[in-house]
Amino acid sequence: MLESHFGSLRRDNGDAVADPDSPFNRDRQAYRAQFQAENPIIAEPAVHGHFWLNKYDHLDATRLVFLRDPRERLLSNYFHWMGAPSRAPFRARMIENSATVLDFARHNSFRYFYTQTYFGGVDMKSFDFIGLFEDFSVDILRLQQFLGAHQEIPHLQINPHENYAQLAGEVRSDTRLMSELADLLADDLRFYEQWSRR
């Protein structure tokens, strides 16, 4: 929908925000300064992806975001990461050590995915639109109305792991595990509850 509406998109998924070894996590301010020096303007009318918003704070832009329940987001991240080999050292170690869902959730990059990793230092009031993954069918219509777009409504993308539905379902059915997960993700859950009301 966005590409059809804007004509072209810059796709940005390169920050590797969850990888503690990434340039983003080694020094965020240096990372931001270098990015802005190399990208004083953006040729495309829109940027789409998974990126740290503050690297674009030198641009006057409309800001849109979809949030997801932190427990569901972590499960999706976990099975995506663990489902395929990787050359990235941190991810490779997680796979080699057969990290569990709780191991994954205990790592700060995932435990504080919203409050520190993605939105650390970001003014959430700067967003013009906040939608919810859980209310996608309703919120995508709200976004369409907000943009004045008339393109076909996109389908919700599902985790590409071939057994994701079954594996995630098994975790969800373990009430003790889900309770431990909620405790670990308490800060992000509070963040999600706060900003999902907008």
Image: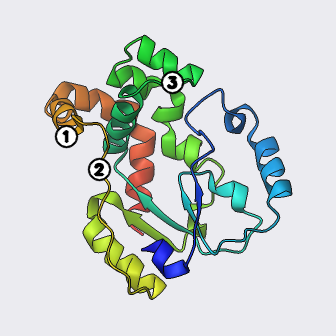
Callout 3: SS? helix
Question: First in sequence: mark 3 or mark 2?
Answer: 3
Label 2 Cα neighbours within 10 Å, binned few <14 / some 14-19 / many ≥20: few
Cβ–Cβ under 8 Å for marks 2 and 1:
yes
**Image spot of residue 4 (x, y percent):** 47, 78
Q: Amino acid at mark 1?
A: Ala
Which residue is denoted by mark 2 in the rendering?
158
Seen at 60% across and 71% down, the residue is 46
Locate the N terminus by quadrant: bottom left
Tell me how far mark 2 sits from mark 1, CA to CA: 9 Å
**Image spot of residue 2 (x, y percent):** 47, 73
Tell me how far mark 3 sits from mark 2, CA to CA: 21 Å
Tell me how far mark 1 sits from mark 3, CA to CA: 22 Å
Quarter holding residue 144: bottom left
Rendered image: mark on residue 165? 1
Coloring basis for residues: rainbow
Query: Which residue is farthest left?
Result: 173
Residue 91 to residue 146: above or below:
above
Q: Amino acid at mark 2?
A: Ile
Callout 2: SS? loop
**Image spot of residue 128 (x, y percent):** 54, 74
Seen at 29% across and 50% down, the residue is 158
Which residue is denoted by mark 3 in the rendering?
91
